[in-house]
Image (tube, rainbow, N blue to C red):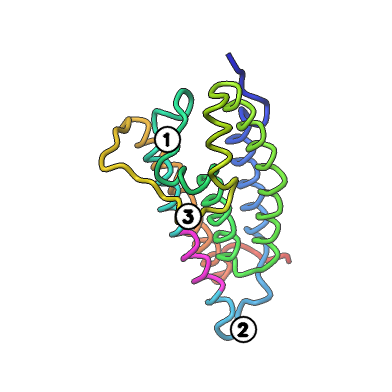
């Protein structure tokens, strides 16, 4: 039986630590675009759109893998157009949250960190899936893009059975991008009312 690698086991913990560091920085900083006509608003609107796409996309992915992730090779729905659709939507959500800070640097840093860290997770997961599913997974790799979705390959069943308990937990994970938008807006309100000082 294949054991999970360190990067796979620590994924959620490292993501939470990174988010806390990110918020700690945002607490006492402000965007140089703040106050420039329309610019900061455009950043925020684009960020909201990306977060919306990411949240719906992650829910779509969770619908298909809830209860199947460890013992079944899922190749339908979002997994028919990309081998890593959950991470694809996650990077969109990360970029969206970054843009919602009304900066350019933060979304660039988020995307860069995502690429560096999650690429190792994806490779580790692929090794595990190959060890479990062997030729079936290799065949899946040959016809399905590694990361960026190819919509023309979409294959969805008429009906699909899910595990509602697992899916309910996945819903909460999928919505954290939206919660981050609310937290960012609250921080901005604290800055505007001088409840939180701005040092940089």
Q: Earlier in the sequence, mark 1 or mark 2?
A: 2
> Disc 3 designates what residue?
54
How far apart are the two marked residues, 3 and 2, measured between alpha carbons? 28 Å
Q: Quadrant of the C terminus?
A: bottom right
Taking the magenta stretch, the answer to whether it contains residue 177 is no
Q: Which element is circle 2 on? A: loop
Look at the image and give the residue range highlighted in magenta: 43-51
CA neighbours of label 2 inside 10 A, class few (<14), some (14 to 19), many (20+): few
Q: Position of residue 186 (x, y in %)?
A: 50, 61
Vertical placement of residue 181 versus 136, above or below: below
> Disc 1 designates what residue?
65
Residue 105 position by quadrant:
bottom right
> Disc 2 designates what residue?
36
Vertical placement of residue 135 versus 60, above or below: above
| Chief secondary structure of the magenta portion | helix
- The answer to whether residue 56 is left or right of residue 177 is left
Please tell me which residue lies in front, 64 or 176. 64
Q: Position of residue 45 (x, y in %)?
A: 49, 71
CA neighbours of label 3 inside 10 A, class few (<14), some (14 to 19), many (20+): many
Pointer 1 with pointer 3, Cβ within 8 A: no
Question: Given this view, does label 3 or label 2 mark the residue nearer the observer?
Answer: 3
Q: Which mark is residue 187?
A: none
How many numbered circles does the render carry?
Answer: 3
Pointer 3 with pointer 2, Cβ within 8 A: no
Taking the magenta stretch, the answer to whether it contains residue 48 is yes
How far apart are the two marked residues, 1 and 2, measured between alpha carbons? 44 Å
């Amino acid at each position: 039986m294949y054991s999970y690698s360190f990067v796979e086991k620590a994924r959620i913990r490292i993501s939470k630590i990174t988010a806390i560091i990110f918020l700690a920085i945002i607490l006492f900083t402000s965007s140089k675009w703040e106050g420039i006509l329309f610019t900061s608003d455009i950043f925020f609107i684009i960020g909201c759109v990306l977060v919306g796409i990411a949240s719906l996309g992650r829910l779509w992915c969770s619908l298909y893998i809830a209860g199947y992730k460890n013992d079944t090779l899922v190749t339908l729905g979002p997994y028919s157009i990309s081998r890593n659709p959950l991470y694809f939507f996650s990077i969109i959500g990360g970029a969206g949250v970054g843009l919602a800070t009304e900066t350019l640097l933060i979304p660039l840093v988020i995307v860069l960190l995502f690429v560096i860290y999650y690429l190792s997770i994806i490779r580790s997961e692929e090794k595990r899936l190959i060890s479990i599913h062997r030729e079936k997974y290799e065949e899946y790799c040959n016809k399905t893009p590694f990361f960026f979705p190819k919509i023309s390959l979409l294959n969805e069943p008429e009906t699909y059975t899910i595990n509602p308990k697992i899916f309910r937990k996945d819903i909460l994970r999928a919505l954290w991008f939206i919660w981050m938008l609310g937290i960012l807006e609250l921080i901005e309100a604290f800055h505007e009312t001088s409840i939180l000082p701005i040092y940089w």
